[in-house]
Image (cartoon, rainbow, N blue to C red):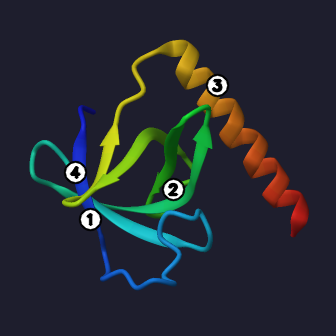
């Protein structure tokens, strides 16, 4: 996926939790063919100096990892092209998932 812009499925308020990785958030993404897909935001997290987002298609156990940033127009998602970067991000997400699972 090339860099895609998307917006939240709600109007943000100061305490909505967007961007802090807390709670179940949903996000609509428009694919290149114009199809809209709803995704669950699993986490937004940092690795090094970059932010990343883990998304799961609605009703799925699979997680997808993307570079994450925001600008005045909304959220920007970018593909992780580098295998080494993807491996680091995947490992960080896996460790974070295991930690949050052990807290419950």
The earlier-in-sequence mark between 2 and 4 is 4
Chain-order first, disc 3 or disc 4 = 4
Do tag 3 and tag 4 residues touch (Cβ < 8 Å)? no
Distance between the alpha carbons at the discs numbered 1 and 3: 26 Å
Front residue of this view, candidates 41 and 14: 14
Q: Say which of marks 3 and 2 sits in front.
A: 3
Seen in the image, is 103 located left or right of residue 95?
right
Give yes or no for contact between labels 3 and 2 (Cβ–Cβ under 8 Å). Answer: no
Q: Which mark is residue 7?
A: 1
Q: Residues within 10 Å of mark 1 (few under 14, many from 20)?
A: some
Residue 9, placed above or below residue 41: below
Instruction: State the separation of the CA atoms marked 3 and 2.
Output: 23 Å
User: In the rendered image, which quarter contains the C terminus?
Assistant: bottom right
Q: Given the current orientation, which residue lies at the most extreme left position?
A: 34
Alpha-carbon span between mark 2 and mark 4:
22 Å
Foreground disc of the pair 2, 1: 1
C-alpha distance separating marks 2 and 1? 21 Å
Residue 27 sits in quarter: bottom left
Q: Residues within 10 Å of mark 3 (few under 14, many from 20)?
A: few
Q: Nearer the viewer, residue 80 or 74?
A: 74
């Amino acid at each position: 996926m090339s860099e895609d812009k998307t917006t939240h499925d709600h109007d943000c308020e100061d305490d909505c939790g967007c961007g802090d990785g807390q709670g179940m958030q949903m996000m609509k993404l428009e694919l290149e063919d114009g199809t809209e897909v709803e995704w669950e935001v699993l986490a937004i997290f940092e690795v090094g100096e970059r932010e990343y987002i883990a998304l799961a298609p609605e009703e799925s156990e699979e997680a997808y990892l993307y570079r994450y940033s925001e600008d005045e127009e909304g959220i920007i998602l970018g593909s992780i092209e580098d295998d080494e970067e993807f491996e680091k991000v995947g490992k960080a997400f896996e460790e974070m998932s295991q930690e949050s699972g052990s807290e419950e």
